[in-house]
Amino acid sequence: MARKYDNKNILTPAERKRQSKEKKRYPGGAAIPKNLPESYNSSISENKQCFGCKFNHKGFCTNWKAPIKIEYVCNSWASPSSTSLRLQTEQYGTISLKDNIDTTFSEFAKPPIDEDIEQFFQIYREIFYDIPKRGTQSHTTLVEDGKDYIEDYVDPKDTTITALLNKVEALQEQIQEEFSTQSHPFYPDGSILHIPYVEIGIMQNGKYRKIKWSTWLTWSDANPNFKKEDGSKKSISDIAYIFENNSAISTIPKGEEIRTINDFNDYNIEAPSDILNFNKIKNSIDQQRLDLAEIEILRQLLDTKETTVGNNDQPDQPAPRDRTSYSRG
């Protein structure tokens, strides 16, 4: 509990002397200036009055800097021809010493530390809006000093931004993975497409790659997926989509032609033109000072994006094949 100190009834000698001077008045009730000393009183001696003091200048004492009455005098009186100044000291006897000097001990101990902290925060709240936002003595300085004092301090805003950046990277990887494994909605990767006596090809990453006929024969003869249980080769109608003409195949995106066996593994996945540059987004976030409202908006946007991507996890089912344009055995 904070201590309370009551000093209302304790007067210092100087305070007592001041109050004594306030009580002194001229006959008639006019107040005697406080600058004049205790020894200032009326004098019956004409030879020693303020009238003849060297400090008197037209009724104003240049020594005590106060107006005076010429029939009064104080212990600092000096004749106009005197070149010395007599210093007066007040002396006290044993009894009067106790009446004029405070000889009691006062408490010099510091108040408890909790009183200092409470007083500090009370002052801080009163002048809060008067403290500059930035500068040597500002709110910014208080915040930075507090963060330096707290070991391993982590700003909650930085934690939220880091989590958002991790989510952006995860979405980037998810989108990239889905794009790299994209396939045609009707003809899955690995499907063989054939126009009798015209051409044959295979679907890879959603694109149709025409195969040189001699390379097809070599590759199909060595492929166990094209063999029957007895080891004989399946017919082309058992392993391929058969088309009557090029009208359907012409609408499928084309890849590089396969001329040799090694060309089966030689294909590039083109980067999509409509996917944002996530590295640019990441760098932009790193350089921005986001407030909590902006962080929340960005979090909601990423949640929406994540939901949209998640709903596309299931591949589209192939549409029923139109057997009027092609047939499979």
Image: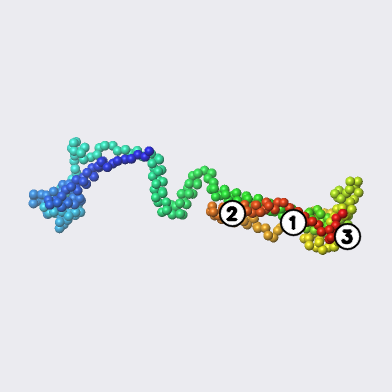
Q: Identify the element where label 1 is drawn.
A: loop
- Residue 139: image x %, image y %? 45, 51
Work out how far the residue at label 3 is from the one at label 2, CA to CA, in angstroms. 55 Å
**Residue at 84% over, 58% down:** 323
Q: In the shown orientation, is residue 16 left or right of residue 266?
A: left
Residue at the disc numbered 3: 196
Q: Earlier in the sequence, mark 3 or mark 1?
A: 3
* Residue 33 badge: none
| Residue type, label 3 | Pro
Mark 2 burial class by Cα count in 10 Å: few <14, some 14-19, many 20+ = some
Q: Quadrant of residue 89?
A: top left
Foreground tag (2 vs 1): 2
Q: Which residue sits at x=77%, y=56%? A: 319
Q: Which structural element holds mark 2?
A: helix
Nearer to us in this view, 165 or 59: 165
Give the image location of residue 162, x and y in percent. Answer: 59, 49
Query: Residue at image x 18%, y 41%?
Result: 91
Q: Nearer the viewer, residue 70 or 6?
A: 6
The amino acid on which the numbered mark 1 sits, given as a three-letter code, is Ile
Q: Is residue 65 left or right of residue 276?
A: left
**Residue underneath mark 1:** 269
Q: Amino acid at mark 2?
A: Leu
For residue 283, side relative to residue 321 (left or right): left
Q: Which quadrant does the N terminus fall into?
A: top left
For marks 3 and 1, give the CA distance. Answer: 29 Å
Which residue is disc 2 drawn over? Answer: 298
Residue 265: x and y, percent? 80, 53
Q: Disc 3, disc 1: CB below 8 Å?
A: no
x and y, in percent, of residue 224 in the image: 86, 48
Precedes in sequence: disc 2 or disc 1: 1
